[in-house]
Image: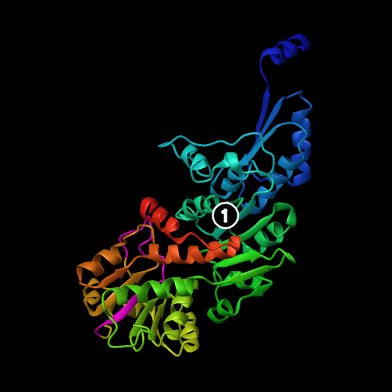
Amino acid sequence: MEELKMNCHSGSKVIVSCYVNGVTPLEEDLNRLVMSMQSTGADIIKLVINATNITEISRIFHLLSHCQVPLIAYSIGERGLISQILCPKFGGFLVYGSMEGNSVPGLPTLENLRQAYKVEDIDEDTKVFGLISKPVGHSKGPLLHNPTFRRVKYNAIYVPMFVDDLKDFFSVYSSPEFEFAGFSVGFPYKEAVVEFCDEVHPLAKAIGAVNTIIRRSSDGKWVGYNTDREASITAIEDALKHRGCTNGETSFDSPLAGKQFVLAGAGGAGRALAVGAKSRGARVVIFDIDFERAKTLAHEVSGEARPFEEVFNFHPEKGAILANATPLGMHPNTDRIPVAEVTLQDYRLVFDSVYTPRKTRLLKDAEAAGAIIVSGVEMFLRQAIGQLNLFTGKEAPEEFMRDIILAKF
């Protein structure tokens, strides 16, 4: 046995591998497991878990940071994706990627590792930003934020974070040892995440929703912001102005002033749209599956609330604006729209916050009916520009980011 071991070491290295099937062991149990594997004389240790909560990945990060021999450790599944991408930051030996056309849940493709994430450039000083959402598979954020970080020479990485429970997430990853510097916040957490911020910017507080969180470097506190409102409303305004829809207003007035603004969805994105439309002088009509939530938001913006089932047959004023702030039409359920197709002819402009696909069925039908259409991609770009400014403290390269959107989305 000793001779065999020596021969093995003379020309190759030994990897001892373990897959933990079932519940992820506690940190001390994982430590004992790794020590047991290390005692075999292994040159490299490989440990794979199947995390059921993203907070369990913190145990992997701790192992990577303290192991005395080269360690490959990660979780399979969508919740484990960050264990792969952030492996170099915490001292992991190598990162796995899947081949194109052979996707594995939780395993990034080799192309994404090289192009979107540039894992070879990640080091212990790399700041971590991510999207808190459920689901996260639709997100294009890494394709936009990571190249932009590199463009402005900012050592940071942006990763998707499949979060099941906000309280659990912040109780674990607020620890300074993980160096999580900030987050984008997506569906369905934009309202609920407010309570986990130490401070909330006045605009976000007025909206009642946060889509951006920054860890303030001076004291480590989480500060919440909202870049959705101006992103969505300016996208709508610019489209109307481009088509000459000013109704005789001065250049200082919004083309939304006095218009009926029909909003489907009163969640985080819907709140940003409603508050933004109200700030421009529009008259807001809100539909939501939670009628009480619709009524609450309508009260805040001096608008009107209606049960969601009425939106399908609702006939707006001629020249009204329609904004979809629900997930209806998002990939993979791309055939659904929130209103009756026949009513689209009455809208002057239709906006869809969904950006996967870029041109949703709602936008296709609205365009065929003669309406001006605004894709959620435009809102996504504009809110991301605001986020980059907050993430880095630098001015975001807007044209560079727009070029990425045109090429990748």
Disc 1 element: strand
User: Residue 312 lies in what quarter of the image?
Assistant: bottom left
Q: In the rendered view of the protein, which quadrant contains the N terminus?
A: top right
Image coordinates for residue 180, horizontal then vertical, percent: 66, 56
Asked if residue 398 shows in the view, the reply is yes
Nearest the camera: 261 or 166?
Answer: 261
Secondary structure mostly seen in magenta is loop
Within the magenta stretch, is there residue 7? no
Nearest the camera: 213 or 209?
Answer: 213
User: Residue 365 lies in what quarter of the image?
Assistant: bottom left
Residue shown at 67%/13% (left/top)? Answer: 11
Image coordinates for residue 203, horizontal then vertical, percent: 56, 79
Specify the segment rendered in magenta: 318-336
Image coordinates for residue 133, horizontal then vertical, percent: 53, 60
Q: Is residue 12 above or below residue 363?
A: above
The outermost residue toward the top is 3
Left or right: 346 as drawn, with respect to 228: left
Within the magenta stretch, is there residue 332? yes
Residue shown at 74%/14% (left/top)? Answer: 5
Asked if residue 354 shows in the view, the reply is no
Badge 1 local density, few (<14 within 10 Å), some, or many (20+)?
Answer: many
Q: Is residue 377 above or below residue 343?
A: above
Residue shown at 75%/12% (left/top)? Answer: 6
Colour mapping: rainbow
* Amino acid carrying mark 1 in the image: Met
Q: How many numbered marks have been drawn onto this rendered protein structure?
A: 1
Image coordinates for residue 229, horizontal then vertical, percent: 47, 75
Q: Is residue 10 above or below residue 46?
A: above
Q: Which residue is mark 1?
A: 161
User: Residue 302 lies in what quarter of the image?
Assistant: bottom left
Nearest the camera: 354 or 118?
Answer: 118
